[in-house]
Image (tube, grey):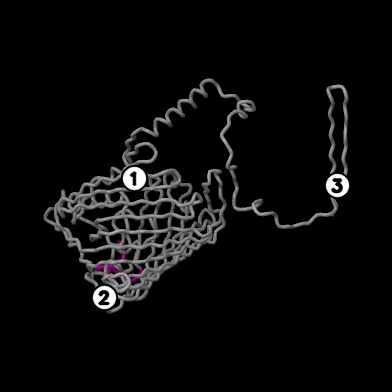
């Protein structure tokens, strides 16, 4: 396949001598589908050269539409305002910010629950651009349990390409069972329910110790985390019956846990088979984004040892999940997750597995919607969560309703517990499902653009008095 190449040129010398030239050749020796040298075609869609500098001299000469005097004045005001914002205090409903790095959440300043009673808390967060360094500090005091709590945390990126992060925390705090941390909205909602409706939806225990972690991404498709935790865990008790209403009703007792000293070593992997593209910003910082939508596989292992770590209980936990989301068309936008965990050895109550159930606060993840908080626990857990967003399939042309989305879901799960761990559990008010627990229902989302209402039915394993609807 020979190819013709022709080049024409013309010019003049000193404006007196004109010349023209023509070059003609035939390219006949070349290779098709030859692999390009490294760095020509890779995952980077934009690369900023390391010596690139911002220079407005080119645009000042070649700008197609010149800025007006008013526009130049506006840009100057924006620049001055940005410099001012970097040193100013701004106050909002959900956040209080000083400059661009320090923030605090006023929603968490006051908490109420049946263990701490009225509690005051102060928090401050530090965040550098692109999460190069992050820190947080929380101090909290409960007036009913008369205990001071705190949490100090710090994390930092080791490399500019974000492949490795080190983190650590030191804490003495009250923790809700089956939650690592609560969001400010979850805490304020639970406080409101307890004060107004005499319903504290969570169970608690005290935990003090420290945690160290290393996150490392070998390649964009393989992520890992190694962590070591030490915690002294003790039972928390109900200390108040205060509320604005229902003064003749008492809060439920806070369940006991297995008091324990635990040291655990854990490792987990996330396998992400998707393709990625990246932007190299020229300063060593690299941003990646996903361009395909394949499901993720997560695998993990946790070990608590008596001899090796001097823990009160020795057990092993193996867990994994497979899931993702896919957009097929405007009526088929599915989310799914299949997972499970198996625990061997002596497992204390607070470390047992559980269905990710409705907490009674504000829930964001794929969850079981017709079960209650901490209802199903065990040392072997298997589950399926599936939902589809049908969009506006039923009411696309109806005024007002056309803003809402219709969600359909189906969840199934199975839990087991060995006789040894059932006898060991300090609290036995949980259930073992009869066969495979199943539920189904529908939800309406985008109410006021942010809220979602769900209607869920148990297909078996009724709750109480043969009730199947919550």
Taking 352 as reference, is 48 above or below it? above
Is residue 136 toward the left or the right of residue 18 in the image? left
Distance CA(mark 1)–CA(mark 2)? 41 Å
Which residue lies most toward the left here?
A: 248
Observer-side mark, 1 or 2, equals 1
Identify the secondary structure beneath mark 3.
strand
* Residue 132 placement (x, y as % from top left): 44, 47
Quadrant housing residue 369:
bottom left
* Label 1 CA crowd tier, 10 Å (few <14, some 14–19, many 20+): some
- Between residue 279 and residue 228, name the one nearer to us: 228
> What segment is highlighted magenta in the picture?
459-470
Left or right, residue 20 beside residue 443:
right
- For residue 422, the mark is 2
Q: Which residue is mark 3?
A: 4
Q: Is residue 46 above or below residue 276?
A: above
Q: Nearer the viewer, residue 425 or 384?
A: 425
Q: Picture coordinates of residue 410 (x, y %)?
A: 41, 64
Residue linked to disc 1 = 125
N-terminal of the two: label 1 or label 3?
3
Residue 308 rendering spot, x and y as whole percentages: 33, 72
Q: Position of residue 449 (x, y in %)?
A: 40, 45
Whole-number angstrom distance, CA of label 3 to CA of label 2: 83 Å
Q: Is residue 462 magenta?
A: yes
Residue at (53, 53) in percent of width and height: 290
Mark 1 vs 3: CB contact within 8 A: no
């Amino acid at each position: 396949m020979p190819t013709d190449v022709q080049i024409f040129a013309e010019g003049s010398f000193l404006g007196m001598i004109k010349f023209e030239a023509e070059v003609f050749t035939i390219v006949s020796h070349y290779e098709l589908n030859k692999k390009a040298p490294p760095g020509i075609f890779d995952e980077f869609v934009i690369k900023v050269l390391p010596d690139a500098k911002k220079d407005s001299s080119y645009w000042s000469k070649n700008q197609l539409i010149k800025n007006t005097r008013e526009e130049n004045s506006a840009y100057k005001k924006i620049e001055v305002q940005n410099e001012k914002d970097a040193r100013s205090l701004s106050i909002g409903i959900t956040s209080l910010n000083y400059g661009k790095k320090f923030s605090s959440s006023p929603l968490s300043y006051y908490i109420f629950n049946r263990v701490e009673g009225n509690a005051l808390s102060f928090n401050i967060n530090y965040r550098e651009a692109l999460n190069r360094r992050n820190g947080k500090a929380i101090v909290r005091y409960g007036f009913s349990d008369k205990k001071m709590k705190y949490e100090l945390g710090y994390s930092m990126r080791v490399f500019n390409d974000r492949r490795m992060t080190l983190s650590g925390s030191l804490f003495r705090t009250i923790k809700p069972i089956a939650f690592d941390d609560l969001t400010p909205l979850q805490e304020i909602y639970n406080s409101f329910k307890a004060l107004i409706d005499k319903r504290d939806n969570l169970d608690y225990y005290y935990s003090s110790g420290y945690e160290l972690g290393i996150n490392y991404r070998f390649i964009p498709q393989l992520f890992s985390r190694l962590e070591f935790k030490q915690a002294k865990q003790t039972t928390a008790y109900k200390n108040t019956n205060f509320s604005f209403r229902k003064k003749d009703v008492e809060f439920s007792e806070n369940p006991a846990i297995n008091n324990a000293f635990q040291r655990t070593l854990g490792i987990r992997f996330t396998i992400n088979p998707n393709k990625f593209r990246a932007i190299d910003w020229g300063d060593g910082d690299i941003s990646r984004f996903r361009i395909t939508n394949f499901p993720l596989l997560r695998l993990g292992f946790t070990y608590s040892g008596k001899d090796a770590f001097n823990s009160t209980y020795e057990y092993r936990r193996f867990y994994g999940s497979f899931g993702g989301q896919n957009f097929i068309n405007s009526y088929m936008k599915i989310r799914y997750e299949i997972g499970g965990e198996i625990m061997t050895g002596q497992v204390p109550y607070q470390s047992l597995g559980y269905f990710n159930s409705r907490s009674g606060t504000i829930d964001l993840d794929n969850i079981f919607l017709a079960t209650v908080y901490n209802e199903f626990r065990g040392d072997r857990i298997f589950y399926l969560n599936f939902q589809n967003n049908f969009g506006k399939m039923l009411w696309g042309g109806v005024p007002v309703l056309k803003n809402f989305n219709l969600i359909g879901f189906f969840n199934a799960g199975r839990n087991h517990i060995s006789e040894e761990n059932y006898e060991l559990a300090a609290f036995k008010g949980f259930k073992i499902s009869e066969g495979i627990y199943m539920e189904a229902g529908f939800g309406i989302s985008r109410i006021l653009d942010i809220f979602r209402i769900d209607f869920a039915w148990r297909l078996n394993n009724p709750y109480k008095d043969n009730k199947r609807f919550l």
